[in-house]
Amino acid sequence: MSPENLTLKSVIERLWVAPENAEWTPKTDVLPLSDVKRWMDSDDIEVLGFTGSMIHDGRFRIEPPLKVEDYVRWVMHYFGRCFRENPEGEWSDSSYSAGWDLVGVFIKLWDDGRVPRELLLELKVWIAEVYKNADDRLRTCIVNAALEHLFERKPIRKYFSDWQSDPILSTAYNEACFWDGKTPLSR
């Protein structure tokens, strides 16, 4: 199926027996990498959100495995759209839920010593670009939903400390440092 014919319905039908008002049953436990990559390239934000759910659903394994580099690039694409568009779909993330999910992704990558540190830098630079190009609503979202919770971990706060020397990013850094809470997001 070509990307222009790709719909959420077609992806769901490919993977699930999905009766209305009843529990869904997986048709398979293997997601071919070629399918996952095609879904990751979709222009439909609902397909992108559904793809994220399938990537993280423990009932499925991707064969051959998805490379972390491809996953990180997809995260930036998908969450970037969620931040900008703030969708209200069934599968797509709102701006705030994308921020919360970004915390989990970043921390999982941070804690995995096998992940090339360049990917963390790529994410950090991407967050900076999104913040710099955002309106006030999105800047507040990025601080409240993502940075505050990332900065609950002192090593991550230190990793972002170079933002203090940037006239725009210093505001984000300082606002995020005001947060003094502990949430499950940073665990």
Image (spheres, helix red, strand yellow):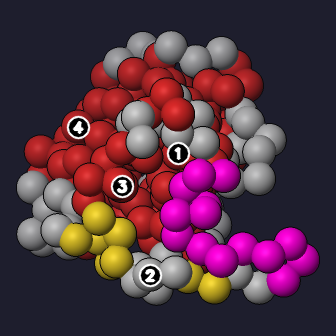
Compared across the picture, whether 70 is left or right of 74 comes to left
Q: Which residues are magenta?
A: 9-22
Amino acid bearing label 2: Thr
Disc 4/disc 1 C-alpha distance (Å)? 21 Å
Label ID, residue 122: 4
Q: Which-is-in-front pick, marks 2 and 4?
A: 2
Compared across the picture, whether 134 is left or right of 52 comes to right
Asked if the residues shown at circle 2 and circle 4 are in contact, with their CB atoms under 8 angstroms apart, the answer is: no
Q: Of label 3 and label 2, which has the lower sequence position?
A: 2
Disc 3/disc 4 C-alpha distance (Å)? 22 Å
Furthest residue in direction front, as rendered: 1
Residue 11 part of the magenta-drawn span: yes
Rendering coords of residue 86 (x, y %): 71, 33
Secondary structure under tag 1 reads helix
Disc 1/disc 3 C-alpha distance (Å)? 10 Å
- Residue at the spot of label 2: 28
The quadrant the N terminus occupies is top left
Rendering coords of residue 41 (x, y %): 39, 36
Asked if the residues shown at circle 3 and circle 2 are in contact, with their CB atoms under 8 angstroms apart, the answer is: no
